[in-house]
Amino acid sequence: MLDAAIKALSQMFTAPFRAVLLKSVGLAVAFLIVLSIVFYRLTVWLTGAGEVWAENALGTMSHYPLLALAKLLAVAFGFGIVAGAIFLMPAVTALVASFFADEIAETVERTYYPLDPPGLALALPRAVLEGIKTAALAVLIYICCAPFLLLAGFGAVLFFLATAWLLGREYFELAAMRFHPVADAKALRHAHRATVFVAGMFIAGFVSIPIVNLATPLFGTAFMVHMHKRLTRHRRPELIEPARSERAP
């Protein structure tokens, strides 16, 4: 597993990966900016509406105090949106990965496994659907984990473990679906769930580093391509070929 992580990291600085990195970072940043603007506009509207209601209830003398409070709340919400963007980074990277997983996986397979049968690119709608499902699940789980963040160490550990489970699941299935039907890829992940979970901890550690975590789709996909190869190296080719033929046009 450590060897797989080292190989994934070493390939991060190659020319093909740099090209994908620019696209994935651009998409992730654009998504976070749009999301932040939407939430900021929403909070400004809510604080403004609340200010008008309170002024009507308390009288015109309360105008300036309420205006100052509304501005203060808008700034506080602004900082909250930035923190939320960091908090949602695992979900964003899971969504971004669905667009570039095949491009990254193909580069890894061609570099390290040139003699193996190449994987088949997953249909973009299916890949995006998997990314959206994982991102939505991430948001749901993180909302459930958020109250525990108040418990200092326990909350941080819980958040890290949830991130490891989510990202390990997402990236392994994207790598496996290049060689197996969707149901079989999920079954393979379930059969090796303990190994995939531990591997997910590597990705969770990567995604916890600010700025660097924008490259998570590259590292996570490359890492799980190596893990999938290691977990299926004992499988006979005839077990892989039927799965490939099922997805052939």
Image (cartoon, helix red, strand yellow):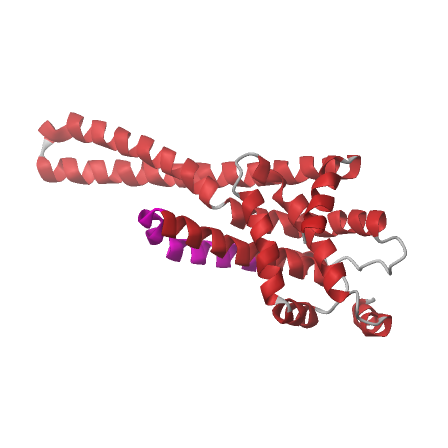
Choose between 139 and 198: the one closer to the eye. Answer: 198
- The x and y percentages for residue 249 are 83, 66
Q: Is residue 208 left or right of residue 192?
A: left
Quadrant (top left, top right, bottom left, bottom right) of the N terminus: bottom right
For residue 198, what is the image quadrant? bottom right
* Residue drawn at the location 18% of the way across and 31% of the way down: 66
- The x and y percentages for residue 194 are 58, 65
* Residue drawn at the location 9% of the way across and 28% of the way down: 61
For residue 36, what is the image quadrant? top left
- The x and y percentages for residue 40 are 39, 37
Q: Is residue 75 magenta?
A: no
* Residue drawn at the location 9% of the way across and 33% of the way down: 59
Q: Is residue 138 magenta?
A: yes
Magenta span main SS = helix
- Report whether residue 177 is seen: no
Choose between 229 and 238: the one closer to the eye. Answer: 229
**Vertical order, 162 against 52 (above or below):** below
Chain part drawn in magenta? 133-152
**Vertical order, 219 against 212 (above or below):** below
Q: Is residue 42 left or right of residue 13?
A: left
- Report whether residue 105 is seen: yes
Residue sitting farthest toward the right: 115
* Residue drawn at the location 51% of the way across and 53% of the way down: 163
Residue sitting farthest toward the front: 2
- The x and y percentages for residue 213 are 57, 40
